[in-house]
Image (cartoon, helix red, strand yellow):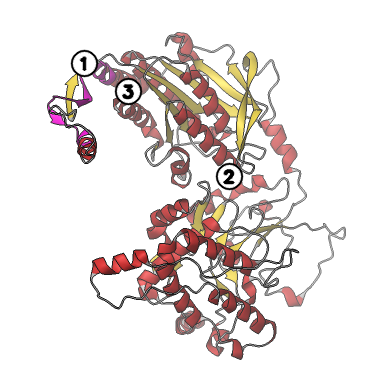
Amino acid sequence: MEERVGRWWHQAITKVTRLDHPGAAVQLQDMQKCIAIFFRTAGGPAALRLTPASMQAVGGQRHWLQKLAGSGQRADTAQLEPDVLALPATLAVFDTVQLNRDLYLWLAMLSACFVHRGDWITDNLMASQKVLAQFPGFAARYQALLQAHLAQRPNVDRLGGEKAQAEAAVQSAFRATVVSAPKHHETNHASRLWRDFCRADFSPPWSIEVDPTGDQVYGQYQPQDVAAVWLWLSATASPATDRPPGQKGAEANQQAAALKDKQRRRTQATSHEQSRNAMVLPFRAEALMSWSEMVPVNRSTDDEEDGNALNAANDMDKLSVAPDGQTLASRVKFDLDLPSSSADDTPVGPGMTLPEWDYRRAILQPGHCLVQVMQAQHCAPFTPSVALRLTARRLRRRLETLRDAPRAVYGQDSGDEIDLDAWVRFHADQLDAATPCSDTPPIYTRRARLDRSLATLLMADLSLSTDAYATEQARVIDVIRDALFVFGEALHAAGDPFAIWGFSSVRRQHVRMQHLKTFDESWNDASRARVGAVKPGYYTRMGAAIRHATLQLANRPERKRLLMLLTDGKPNDLDVYEGRYGLEDTRQAVREAHVAGLIPFCVTIDEKAHDYLPMLFGQNGYAMVHQPQDLVGQLTQAWVTLSRR
């Protein structure tokens, strides 16, 4: 009974003290596409991930009811980090849906123009100036957001001390960005309003004076010194995921929880010394109710999950991560060390050096990676299961019928159907008076039997993560092996040249390309045996593998060249390739493949692929397989679709 009454009281008093507007709430998931468009248009980096923001400490004046309820101390304001843009999961700051939507768009553009220099107020002020100068059409919306937010700010006269000074600095900076709204006195007609709005001068009428000596204009005020500033960002100079050496392996224990909770949290590296007097238990009564106190407890040795851990994490401003004294790095080195030459695959050739893209310096580092072609030793004959042979036979028959089927030829002067793209181009050209009119415009399509000119290279990710079980009966590597076998059987029936490779890596000096079948080889028992001998490797340096495949396909004489990638996760490696560095290098490698005239396409079974694959391969450059057992059919269907384009 006491718990029920206490829960009711907490909900009631919290509802009374709420200052937001639930009826005008806008969800982040509904605004993701618009935010991405505005962010990219403003020049934001494509590799920056968008996640829900976590609650951060804020200051400012609190009503006595808020003090009674214990609310008003934290807010999920926007946070910008080198690899993550964290925005509130729900915005109900203003009383209209339009203002809350505009706030999401403003934060997206502000984050794209934000440069972290150390002064929170000056950085946001200069970013605001840059946004309004770059997008003058948004000035009217920003004016409405600014006036609504200033009306919510605390009264400086009711504050005292440092709080009053910090609030006065924030409001002074806001008033420096006030833009005169356009006046429309003539008519309310939509066309006249739009014409006047476009003719209005929205150029920023202010200038920001920065001290050339390096002293900051507004002082060292931070977001926790004032009430929540919804129109600004808080930023960090270094990634929030920086951890002490040996702590990256702890992420594996948090994967299950990460699937349920996608909220972005900040971490800080903390170290503590183990006490030599292990039997002495210190007692600190003043820290019993403090969640933020770093407690030296080794969570990895706890076999049972703590149901209260998520609530504790939500109550913390930053999660403290400290070494636990165990030599995790040596264990990882032992597990992932390269095998001896007698047990390892056979190297083919001396190796090849390839460049790698460094997004931080915006340069392509020549000869940065060493790619070594490997071939499995003593491959036993591969014997597929009965079900796999039936699947391969069915897909072989399908591709055999597609081989001789007539195909559509576009841009013809006569045909059976109208080519809509050619029709639009033709009528657009006719608007130009200098373009001569044609009696037989090439705006038709017709079906004809043509000789196919298509080459395909399939790369399979053979990283260590493929050793995990995809189903109760089969591992990921088993599913990939079956897909490679069926793919080879199907393309052999189609008669088009193709190659199959696998890849993994151990840092940049050892990128392993597993030779399964090249363009010059036929699909025979030896190729099938090499496919059957694939095994989990190490890490996923995807950019080097794509560049190696691009060099092979670039020399092919076929008109259409497909580069297909089969993977189960994002790019990663032991060195700096983890995180944004690997994503940017892979994106650059895919861009180089496009420049070379190739068609890159990715097929993945990663559940989080939507977070990074659109940035790497484009919205239509990948296919996501939800069920691992459907990988065989999805891979072949993707090839059929690409070959018809």
The residue pinned by badge 3 equals 391
Question: Residue, x 67% and y 38% (percent of image)?
Answer: 575
Measured in 3D between alpha carbons, the distance from the residue under mark 2 to the one under mark 3, in whole angstroms, is 39 Å
Q: SS class of the residue under badge 3?
A: helix
User: Is residue 272 toward the left or the right of residue 454 in the image?
Assistant: right
Q: Is residue 537 visible?
A: no
Dot placed on the residue nearer the N-terminal end, 1 or 3: 3
Residue 196 appears at what percent x and percent y?
32, 68
Contact (CB < 8 A) between labels 1 and 2? no
Q: Residue furthest front?
A: 434
* 2 or 3: tag closer to the N-terminus: 3
Q: Residue furthest toward the right?
A: 276
Q: Residue at x 64, y 48 (%)?
A: 250
For the record, the magenta segment spans: 398-423
Decide if residue 82 is on the left or right side of residue 493: right
| Looking at the image, residue 545 lies above or below residue 39 | above
Q: Nearer the viewer, mark 1 or mark 3?
A: 1
Q: Per the image, is 557 magenta?
A: no
Q: Which residue is mark 2?
A: 580
- Percent from the top left, x then y, of residue 636? 35, 26
Residue receiving disc 1? 449
Q: How far apart are labels 1 and 2 at the CA level?
A: 46 Å
